[in-house]
Image (cartoon, rainbow, N blue to C red):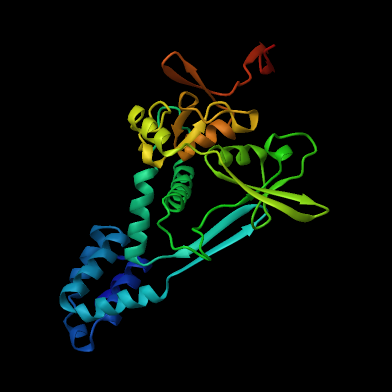
Amino acid sequence: MPRIAEAARRGEIGYQATAVICGFRDKLREDLRPNINQEFWVEKANEGSVEDLRWLEQHTRYVVDPDSFDHQIEEDWDKRFLKISESGGMFHITGVLDRNGGTALRTAIESLAKPLGAGDARLPKQRRADALTEIVHHAMDKGSLPRRHGARPHVAVHTTIEGLKRELGASASHFENGIPVSSKTVQRLACDGVMHRVLKADSMVINLGRAVRTAQPAQWRALKARHKTCAAPGCDRPVGWTYAHHMEFWSRDGQTDLSKMVPLCYFHHRLVHEGGWQVVRVGDRVQFLPPDQPVMIRRRWGEWRRAA
């Protein structure tokens, strides 16, 4: 393509645009390559961005050479992968999805990634991370995932009574994979989870039991009649995506009574347990109180101290 080579040499089009045009030619059937209007592609490369040029290249191949376009779709499908690794308690996700899978994932995440009320100070990337976590929890909570060994997928936490109460010196609670987890997180998960009791003597299991501390079906129906969304101010997360929060923490002898429970979404439920927010009932209203923040006052120019 002499016109393309000349335009690249003279700086009329950039390297990336040149690569897109050359890639377009290489993907076409051989009998179609001589018919490429090189002047047209130089003009389009100057009119828009490289991304616009890529879209034009794909749409053109879709029209003039659909077999080439279909072949690329299959090549992209073969390149897909997802890797999840753990380091220091943080999980790193790396992956590539084809256009169908990527569009579906982004659509689902964007539907849950907008700010939840005026007090939502999360960065966009943090809201997207929380949205992905929320989608996974929702799928597990609804029981729509395939069962393994007769049990549906779930998050298992190993703890002790002392750990649940955050007593000093208590053994660390941990997930099933051995990763330690804070007592605050354990309290949040216990707020709307199923507890299995295991009694041991000399490291031998001597008794297994089960206790349910979740809202019962009748209580959930009442919560849904009272709340259409998460109870946090400004949050529009549907009540079906919430957890029954004990305003008096279970670890502090909180009871599973309807008057002492409110539905909270994943984000606001975490704010209460791990973030230090408080949920209190004032008459018929529920108020959310942020954690105490130190007030800074100025003493002299350039010097600050904490207020008493």
228 or 63: nearer the viewer: 228
136 or 81: nearer the viewer: 136
92 or 245: nearer the viewer: 245
Q: Quadrant of the C terminus?
A: top right
Looking at the image, residue 119 lies above or below residue 102: above
Looking at the image, residue 37 lies above or below residue 202: below
Picture coordinates of residue 211 (x, y %)? 59, 43
Viewer can see residue 74: yes
* Residue at 25% in and 70% down: 58
The residue furthest right is 202
* Residue at 60% in and 20% down: 292
Picture coordinates of residue 137 (x, y %)? 47, 49
Picture coordinates of residue 229 (x, y %)? 36, 33
Tell whether 205 sits left or right of 91: right
* Residue at 80% in and 55% down: 203
Residue 68, picture quadrant? bottom left
The residue furthest bottom is 31
Picture coordinates of residue 226 (x, y %)? 35, 27
Q: How many marks?
A: 0
199 or 97: nearer the viewer: 199
Q: Quadrant of the N terminus?
A: bottom left
Tell whether 274 sits left or right of 143: right
Viewer can see residue 23: no
Tell whether 116 sits left or right of 273: left
Looking at the image, residue 179 lies above or below residue 42: above
